[in-house]
Image (cartoon, helix red, strand yellow):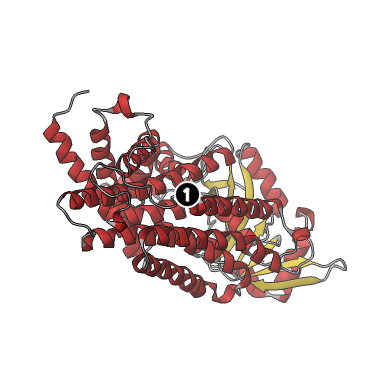
Amino acid sequence: MKIRADIVRMYREIHSWVGIVCGLFLFVAFYAGSVTMFERPLQDWASAPVALPPPVSLEKMPALLEKTFSEHPEAQRNYTIVLHPTPSQPASLIWGMPERMHGPSFANFSALATDGSLVTVSQEPSQAAHFINMLHQQVGLSMPHEAGRLLMGVVALLYAVALISGTLIVIPGLVKNLFAIRLGQNVKRMWLDMHSMLGLFSLPFHIIMALTSVVFAFHDEIYMAEQALLIQHPQAQHDAGGPGHGPHPHGPAAELRKPLDPDQILKTVATQAPGFIPDTLAYSSAHGGHLALRITGRDPCYGARGAGGGFAGVDPYSGRLVSTEYMPGHQSWSQSVLTSFFVLHFGSFGGESVQWGYVLLGLGGAFMFYAGNQLWVVSRRRRERGTGRVEDTKSTRILCALTIGCSLGCVAGISAVLCAAPLLPASSQTVTVQLVYFGVFLLCNGVAFWLKEREAIRILLIFSAILTWIMPISALVVTPLSRMQDSALAVDAFAILYGAFLMLWAVRPEAGQPVLRRKGFPSDPERA
């Protein structure tokens, strides 16, 4: 395909400047997003073990509920039955959590001792994995969530512009340069080849990320516009709030009925949604004391809105499904379309193979943004040498230091958070993990500005590798190896391998920047 040279130049300028503006934000978003693909295993890994008797079976659940409500009447207002306990949710019965929580929250766990007595423990799960997720959502900045959401939307729009312009740039030489990575020539060609190859081969993934991020960022505004349209159609508004809209029964008959036992509810739901696998039953009191029930779970044949799966409203007195807008396999067409955005963004389909694929694509995307910034630096440096300058200009030095400091600062900061998480008391983690991350992040940026480029890259890579290797050690301090679950051991194994990769990258010959070879120019720009 032939594109005029002036048009290619125009798109190259657009791509370069848009990439410089949002490249560092996107590096943090993609790197942190890769980590949060396994947010739940990380939360389990970082949560300290709770001294509780084994979880009770469903047959014994009525007895556990009766004893808990007798000793703690306030538990009846809001409680959750966990069908598959984990280290971060170690009991079959959890109560006292806020009804609308954003991330892990303080909770009470109830269990039955061998003699049938009630055992209750209060604890707050680790906040580390949730913090990394918020870092991903707010492109690495500490700010109110609403402001971060809007900034992420702007970055996503710029990201889409960079994708379009970048694709148009490489089309003229697509066949010739598709698989070319010329490591033995010069720095500019190497970074260009790596940036182009990563971008082209993962282009569908990047299109999905850009489109879904824009939808997430401006979903409130989209819903407001939709609501404004519905207000003009009273009949449609009436239909939306019909009898099947909510899970709350009304009327005096509901007051005289007793809620079904959990095992009966599960059997009733199984007949209505055969492929749905429940995970939790969340009860809350509303509408004059009537119970409302939300059942969460997943269906292997359908994608879900997130890592936690989908959910449905259930009448706790009959077991009848009364709200399926967010239940996999039971949604309306419009809700299915909306859910597809969540499914594609979170990779909540296809099991662990898809999750690992998203991890690799996310890490590849982060490196693509790093390579793009390095390409800009090398191109700018080459133009400056061509004018006779022997030192980098201030703007080139600043961008080079920011590229190294922000990128490796994010890598080191996330490893530092995960190192500290098992050792920190959960009650203070919300603030402490932020201090740990941003402290390490700023330290890395200081090193990048203080030292020469190659020295900074080498030192920060070694620093990141050491922090990553400390992760399994800090976990062992809190949880003995004999008590670790398979998911926790997998996290430790991955940390060891990833730390080794970072260390090998740091100690390899010519770590950081390959030499710039061009007739008439010195091999090392820093020694010119």
Q: Quadrant of the N terminus?
A: top left
Q: Name the residue under label 1.
A: 509
Q: Is residue 135 depicted above or below 323 in this figure?
A: below
At x 47%, y 62%, the residue is: 459
Q: What residue type is labelled 1?
A: Pro
- Local SS, label 1: loop
Q: Is residue 488 left or right of residue 371?
A: right
Q: Is residue 7 left or right of residue 211?
A: left
In this view, the residue in front, 116 or 466, is: 466
At x 19%, y 45%, the residue is: 14
At x 78%, y 71%, the residue is: 118
User: Which residue extends farthest left?
Assistant: 6
x and y percent of residue 409 in the render?
Answer: 43, 62
Q: Is residue 15 visible to the viewer in this orientation of the structure?
A: yes
Q: Quadrant of the C terminus?
A: bottom left
x and y percent of residue 292 in the render?
Answer: 56, 59
Q: Is residue 138 visible to the viewer in this orientation of the structure?
A: no
